[in-house]
Image (cartoon, helix red, strand yellow):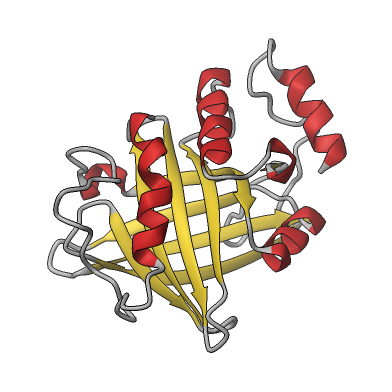
Amino acid sequence: MQRGGYLVQLVLFLWSPWRPQVASVFPENLNFTQENFVLDQFMGKWYEVAVASTCPHYTQRKRGNPVTVALQLTHKSSESNFTMAASTVRNCSCTETSTIHSLTDTPGRFFHHVARFGADVDSIVVQTNYNEQAMMLLLGTEKPSGVQTITIKLYSRSVDVNPAVFEDFKTLVRRNGMSEDTLIVNHYEGECVAGEQVTEPTTPPQVNASHSEELRTQRSVF
């Protein structure tokens, strides 16, 4: 998490007037991504379990539907991009989308365009241990307004989150100028299974026994 203090400098760089439309190179003397990032180890299944954002529209939508997103990342070694398939369950109904993320010259940094909102998005893997958690910084620029936002996401390989990881995520949110009030903890409502009816869990997942009360309080707010 030591790199978190430099993220403000990164934002200033990425938002400067001369920034190219599809930025693909960080300043050579700065490193904001996971050290020695390995793309293939980052692939596979993740759950988006918590988010925080400076975008009011995104925050409003997310608060209205704070559901855990299951992500499946797939990369073919011959291609310069990877696919992120996202699925969510709400009221026993499954929604699935797929997004192509272009690789850049900086390992751990990706780019995609959101046509629905006319936004260019740089995604940066700030920190990951590959087999448990990942923290993502998304820098978005809406077109043609030029409105710029920061979104921070916590990915987990399971729906259960280690309390220490969650604390590190809150620290990253604060270091990027957002209060903990902006943090949204997602609810897990089951898995999308092809050809089968979705069954919602009878009990919510726990971060762990010692942290469950804190999450219940946060979820009642969000």
Q: Quadrant of residue 187?
A: top right
Judge whether 122 appears above or below 126 on screen: below
Q: Quadrant of the N terminus?
A: top left
Q: Is residue 76 visible?
A: yes
Q: Does residue 63 sit above or below 116 in this rendering?
A: above
Q: Nearer the viewer, residue 29 or 90?
A: 29
**Residue at 51% in and 38% down:** 175
Q: Nearer the viewer, residue 220 or 140?
A: 140
Tell me if 197 is positioned left or right of 21 in this view. right
164 left or right, relative to 123: right
Image coordinates for residue 168, horizontal then vertical, percent:
50, 27
Q: Residue at x 58, y 28 (%)?
A: 160
- Asked whether the viewer can see residue 91, the reply is no
> Residue reaching furthest bottom?
144
The image shows residue 192 at horizontal and vertical percentages of 61, 55
Residue 71 against residue 180 in the figure, above or below: below
| Label total for image | 0
Can you tell which quarter of the image residue 183 is in? top right
Q: Tell me residue 11's x, y (percent).
A: 41, 57
- Residue at 83% from the left image edge and 27% from the top image edge: 217
Residue 103 picture location, percent across and down: 24, 65
Residue 148 versus residue 98: which sits nearer the camera? 148
Can you say which quadrant of the picture contains the C terminus?
top right
Residue at the far right in the pictured view = 220
